Every structure is written in C-alpha cells, then in structure tokens.
Image (cartoon, helix red, strand yellow):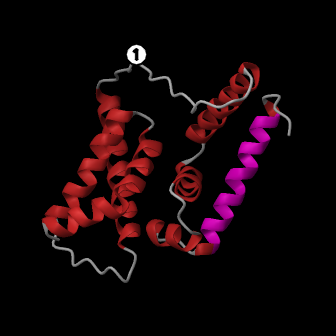
Amino acid sequence: MNAREVERCIDEFGTDIYRFCRKLCAEKTDAEDLYQQTFLKALETEWELDWEKNPKAMFFSLAHNLWKSNRRKQARRNMIAPCNNLDEEAETLPYSEKSIEEGYFQKELATEVRQIIQTLPEKFQVPLILFYLSECSVEQIAAILKKPSGTVKSRLFKARKLIKKRLEDAGYER
C-alpha cells in the first residue's frame, strides 16, 4: 500500500478508525498510538487495496488485532513488573439544554454504562463498540472479527442483556 492510498483512507474513514481506537483503549494517548500504529502498519505492508471490498473493515480488523497484541504484551509486562496509572481523564458529555439534575443523571448513567462495557469480556465488548460507536453493520463486524454474522448478532444480544441486567442490579430502571 502506498502513501497516497493510506492518505485517502485516512480522509475517507480515519475518524471512524480513531473513534474505534478511543473506545477500545479508553485512554486518549493509547488510542492515538493505536491509530497511528494502524495506519503505519498498513503503510508497511504490501497489501493491494480493493475499494470494492470494503477497505474500512480491513482497517478495523488491523486496529483490533494490534490492540489485542498490545494488551497481551502489556499483560506479560505487568506479570513481570506491575505498574498502575494514577491519572484518569474525566470524560464529559456534550452541553445540553436540560436541567442540571437531568444532565447529572445522564452523565452518571453514561459513566455506569461505560464501566459495564469495559468489564464485559472482549468477545462482547468489541462488537458493541463497532456496532454502536463506529456504526458498522453486522456483516462488516463479522468480516472484521472473522466470525459468522449469526455469532455477531448473538453476541450483541447477549451484551445488551448483560448491560441491562447490571444496570437493573445497580438500581437503574427503565
């Protein structure tokens, strides 16, 4: 893949890839590193990009594989010498015209849902992020994860069910 093709990919769907990286990593600096690694890896490889076969899915798959590799590497390093990050970035919701109380409850609910998603197993977490935040279709997710579309649908259903149950257990009602 040459630099012009990579540049075109960044222009076409770079924001979607970045959003996916942000949701996978949960930290801005790690997400930026993953985003750069994804396009750098694409530039280093000898792929022939076929614009008819959804190249966006290829980049999602590449980012996902790099993220999994980085997680494994970090787990090995933590087994040898554990370290904790003391800084946590506070994410904010966009400004709305609602009352302060409603805004607070929505922010609290969003934080709770984010925490629940982060605690879900990877097999549920990744399809949720791709489906809801990157707006990929079930077929695209199936191609990215190299799983049948029925498996993706099942995992999305089970993930929604787990989130709903955990929210109800935490005292949130519909």
Left or right for 44, reference 165: left
Amino acid type, label 1:
Leu
Q: Give x and y (percent) for residue 58.
A: 36, 68
Q: Quadrant of residue 116?
A: top right
Q: Quadrant of residue 48?
A: bottom left
Q: Which residue is pictured at 86% across the width and 40% down the height?
A: 174
Q: Quadrant of residue 167?
A: top right
Q: In this picture, is 34 found above or below 109?
A: below
Q: What secondary structure is the magenta-colored segment mainly?
A: helix
Q: Give x and y (percent) for residue 73.
A: 30, 42
Q: In this picture, is 84 found above or below 46?
A: above
Start and end of the magenta stretch? Answer: 150-168
Q: Which residue is pictured at 26% across the width and 77% down the height?
A: 49
Q: In this picture, is 134 found above or below 48?
A: above
Residue bearing the label numbered 1: 86
Q: Which residue is pictured at 47% across the width and 65% down the height?
A: 145
Nearest to the observer: residue 157 or residue 10: 10
Nearest to the observer: residue 78 or residue 18: 18
Q: Secondary structure at mark 1?
A: loop
